Amino acid sequence: MKIYRFPKSRSLKVLWTLEELGIDYSSISVDLLAENPLTRSPHPFGKVPYLVDGDISISETLAICIYLCEKTEGNLLYPTNIETKASVNTWLSFAATELESSIWGLLKQLVFVPEEKRNADLVLYFTSEANKAISQLSIDENLQWIACNEFTLADIFIAQMLQWAKACGITLPSPADAYLDKTLKRASYYRAVEKNDAP
């Protein structure tokens, strides 16, 4: 199994999932921003993450992560119980729509657009939308994690979005900040970061 990746990108979610599941894999760093890359992703548009597992190739982060969970029997990252899965799917949808749409827009302005070319109105808009989405992040104190009492894919996806928000200078509410701190203390997260950011 091969994962094509790029540092500090969505590919971290895939490597984090793999580390949680204990699946053997090789990861390949892609020259994503180079004009003439030495290493390209097999994705038709050169995107990452991209999974190649034998004859199976998958793009899109969530699709890859669900495939990995469904391939691995007995794991708790993507529950089979319909009620619990509904909760996990709700948070995955929230992460991919409400959170990522605004936070990714803000991150692009602050990181990938040169300062002299940034659109101040867009920065204000995305900051406002990101804060609005984060304010909807209800942390249930009766649960160990975001969707249930087990660590799931929802935690991986929500955690990276909150990380990106903090990288953009957004101050998280105390419950969200404490939740993020807890997720980032997992050994699987450290292993994933080390591998994702490696040359």
Image (cartoon, rainbow, N blue to C red):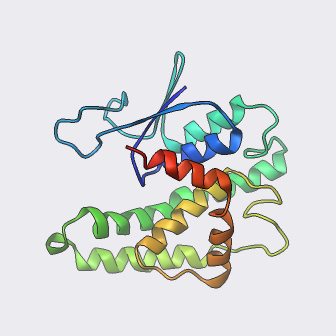
Q: Horizontal and vertical percent for residue 24? A: 62, 30
171, above or below 30, in the image: below
- Vertical placement of residue 88 versus 44, above or below: below
Q: Residue at x 63, y 33 (%)?
A: 67
Q: Is residue 45 left or right of residue 187?
A: left
State the image quarter where residue 78 is shown.
top right
- Residue drawn at 66 percent across, 58 percent down: 155
31 above or below 154? above
Q: Quadrant of residue 180?
A: bottom right
Residue sitting nearer the eye, 149 or 38: 38
x%, y% of residue 189? 61, 54
Q: Quadrant of the C terminus?
A: top left
Q: Position of residue 110 (x, y in %)?
A: 30, 70
Q: Residue 127 in the image: state x and y as whole percent.
A: 40, 78
Report the front residue among 138 and 12: 12
How many callouts does the rendering have? 0
Please identify the quarter of the rendering in which residue 54 is found: top right
Q: Quadrant of the N terminus?
A: top right
Residue furthest to the top in view is: 55
Observer-nearest of 73 and 29: 29
Image point (57%, 30%), residue name? 25
